[in-house]
């Protein structure tokens, strides 16, 4: 009888411990806890709120249909979303009024069409900080929203861009958004695609590192596909030796002239080639033929500053 009583007590204590275990997804403003990320997102609905995420590795994904939501790690760098994808698109599919992401890791995201991303932003403003995107087909992929902006700061895009069909999904691929701002971030070890591709009319790409020294069959570091204005400044670039396209580091208007480049300034950057790079390359190559400003860039051997295509 004593053994049975002891067993019953242990089971009761175990049940209490499980019941008292904090929920992994908590709405900071209300203290409500949820077992899944989707449930927390639905609880915020058309309102505004912050979802604080406990340390751990999750297979969750979520679709934000409305409202304004901040997805925040309780401790930066301790939250990993590993492989989960909603709608065959991304871990976070965002089409509300706005969203922010802080301190998360998105890893191992792959979907059948080859465009699996940590974040698919379809509508609304997006702010991303202290976030790692790694070992996936894409980091961030956007639809078109000319009235909104995407801002990325102190984040890393690593080992991204490989698709099953061989086409590039790109580490960061932004469509016709109103503005793209990327600061203090790192792009490295790309696979078979571009590091940063944008169709936004205005870009600010400042103080980032584009390190292609361990890239594999990569293409451009920055591709302003249809032109654009703004600044590309204070960045460092390493042109790697394993290239699909070794000719260009920054491409401007290779797919057309939808946006004027008259107010585009590329200045105060540093670029060099990695050991084993066998070709000559161009730092800024322009397909559009419209005037822009390229100045004060510190370039290593084998790199020509500017060329018209």
Image: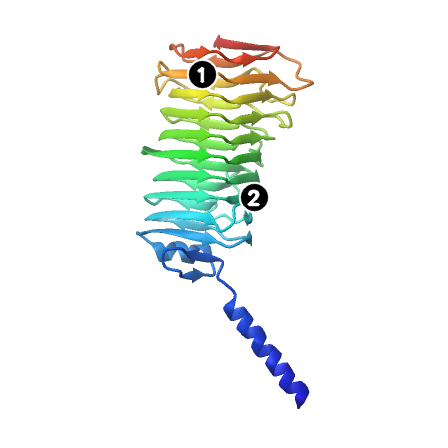
Q: Quadrant of residue 95?
A: top left
Q: First in sequence: mark 2 or mark 1? A: 2
* 176, 8: nearer the viewer: 8
Q: From the top left corner, tell me how far across and down residue 286 is, in percent.
A: 45, 13
Q: Quadrant of residue 94?
A: top left
Give the image's coloring scheme.
rainbow
Q: Residue at x 35, y 13 (%)?
A: 262
Which image quarter holds the N terminus? bottom right
Could you tell me which secondary element the residue under label 2 belongs to? strand
Q: From the top left corner, tell me how far across and down residue 112 is, in percent.
A: 53, 42
Q: From the top left corner, tell me how far across and down residue 148 is, in percent.
A: 33, 35
Q: From the top left corner, tell me how far across and down residue 259 is, in percent.
A: 35, 20
How many neighbours does mark 2 have within 10 angstroms: few (below 14), some (14-19), or many (20 or more)?
Answer: many
Judging by the rendered image, the residue that carries numbered circle 1 is 266
* 58, 298: nearer the viewer: 298
Examine the rendering and report whether any part of residue 176 can be seen: no
Residue 301 lies left or right of residue 222; in this view the side is right
Q: Quadrant of residue 136?
A: top right
Residue 25 lies left or right of residue 2; in this view the side is left
Judging by the rendered image, the residue that carries numbered circle 2 is 107
- Give the distance between the C-alpha atoms of the residues marked 2 and 1, in whole angstroms: 32 Å
Q: Which mark is residue 18?
A: none
Q: Nearer the viewer, mark 2 or mark 1?
A: 1
Examine the rendering and report whether any part of residue 257 can be seen: yes
- Classify 24 as above or below 139: below
* 6, 220: nearer the viewer: 6
Could you tell me which secondary element the residue under label 1 belongs to? strand
């Amino acid at each position: 009888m004593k053994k049975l009583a002891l067993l019953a007590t242990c089971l009761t204590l175990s049940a209490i411990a499980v019941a008292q275990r904090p929920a992994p997804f908590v709405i900071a403003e209300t203290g409500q806890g949820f077992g899944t990320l989707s449930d927390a997102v639905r609880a915020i609905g058309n309102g505004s709120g912050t979802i604080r995420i406990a340390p751990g590795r999750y297979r969750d994904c979520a679709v934000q249909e409305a409202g304004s939501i901040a997805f925040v790690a309780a401790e930066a760098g301790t939250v990993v979303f590993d492989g989960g994808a909603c709608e065959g698109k991304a871990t976070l599919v965002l089409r509300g009024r706005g969203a922010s992401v802080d301190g998360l890791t998105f890893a191992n995201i792959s979907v059948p069409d080859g465009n699996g991303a940590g974040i698919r932003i379809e509508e609304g403003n997006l702010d991303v900080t202290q976030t790692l995107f790694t070992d996936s087909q894409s980091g961030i992929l956007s639809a078109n929203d000319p009235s909104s902006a995407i801002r990325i700061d102190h984040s890393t895009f690593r080992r991204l861009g490989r698709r099953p069909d061989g086409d590039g999904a790109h580490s960061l691929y932004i469509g016709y958004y109103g503005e793209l701002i990327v600061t203090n971030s790192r792009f490295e070890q790309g696979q078979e695609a571009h590091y940063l591709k944008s169709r936004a009319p205005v870009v600010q790409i400042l103080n980032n590192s584009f390190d292609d020294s361990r890239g594999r069959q990569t293409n451009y570091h920055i591709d302003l596909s249809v032109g654009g204005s703004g600044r590309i400044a204070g960045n460092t670039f390493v042109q790697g030796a394993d290239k699909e396209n070794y000719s260009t580091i920054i491409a401007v208007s290779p797919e057309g002239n939808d946006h004027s480049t008259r107010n585009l300034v590329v200045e105060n950057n540093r670029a060099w080639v990695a050991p084993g790079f066998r070709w000559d390359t161009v730092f800024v190559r322009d397909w559009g033929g419209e005037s822009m400003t390229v100045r004060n860039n510190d370039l290593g051997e084998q790199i020509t500053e500017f060329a018209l295509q």
